[in-house]
Amino acid sequence: MKIQTNSFHSLEQVQNEYLNQMPKTQTAKQMGGLSFQEILEQASGLSKEVRFSKHASNRLNTRNIELTDGQMERLNEGAKKAQAKGIKDSLVLVDSLAFIVNVPSSTVVTAMEQSEAQENIFTNIDGAVII
């Protein structure tokens, strides 16, 4: 009968030997890819700009409302803040304009001037952002 002798005396020694032989992996940043945070932001919509539904676009056109670059930037900022707080349907007030934004899809579903809002009542929202 032949007796085998190992240089390993414990399971920990085997694990250490195996783990020390495995090549080190590079991070996504080192390989030129996106970081986990960047991928998460893209998937969750944090980096998306708002878009306008057909209804909201029609409302803006019929009321001759044109957004400046600054107002558009603030609308996007308001949508991002609403998303960060977990709001699903938000009222975003920018200057004298009111927008109802479906936050998960980053879509403006309706738009109006605040003076047009009947009795200043907004329904079917779960949060508001004033920018």
Image: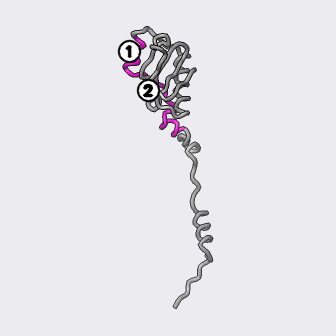
Q: From this viewpoint, which residue is outermost toward the front? A: 119
Task: Report whether 86 appears left or right of 109.
Answer: right
The first of marks 1 and 2 along the sequence is: 1
Labelled pair 1, 2 in contact (Cβ < 8 Å): no
Residue drawn at 53 percent across, 19 percent down: 93
Quarter placement of the C terminus: top right
Front residue of this view, candidates 58 and 41: 58
Q: How many C-alpha atoms fall within 10 Å of the one at disc 1: few (<14), some, or many (≥20)?
A: some
Indicate whether residue 103 is drawn in magenta: no
Image coords of residue 97 (percent x, y): 50, 14
Front residue of this view, candidates 11 and 70: 70
Examine the rendered structure and indicate whether residue 59 appears above or below residue 2: above
Q: Which residues are magenta?
A: 38-61
Residue drawn at 43 percent across, 8 percent down: 64
Residue drawn at 52 percent across, 34 percent down: 86
Front residue of this view, candidates 107 and 26: 107
Q: How many C-alpha atoms fall within 10 Å of the one at disc 2: few (<14), some, or many (≥20)?
A: few
Three-letter amino acid code at the position of disc 1: Asn
- Dot 2 corresponds to which residue? 124
Classified by dominant secondary structure, the portion drawn in magenta counts as helix
Residue drawn at 40 percent across, 17 percent down: 57
Three-letter amino acid code at the position of disc 2: Asn
Q: Secondary structure at mark 1?
A: helix
- Dot 1 corresponds to which residue? 58
Examine the rendered structure and indicate whether residue 115 appears above or below residue 6: above
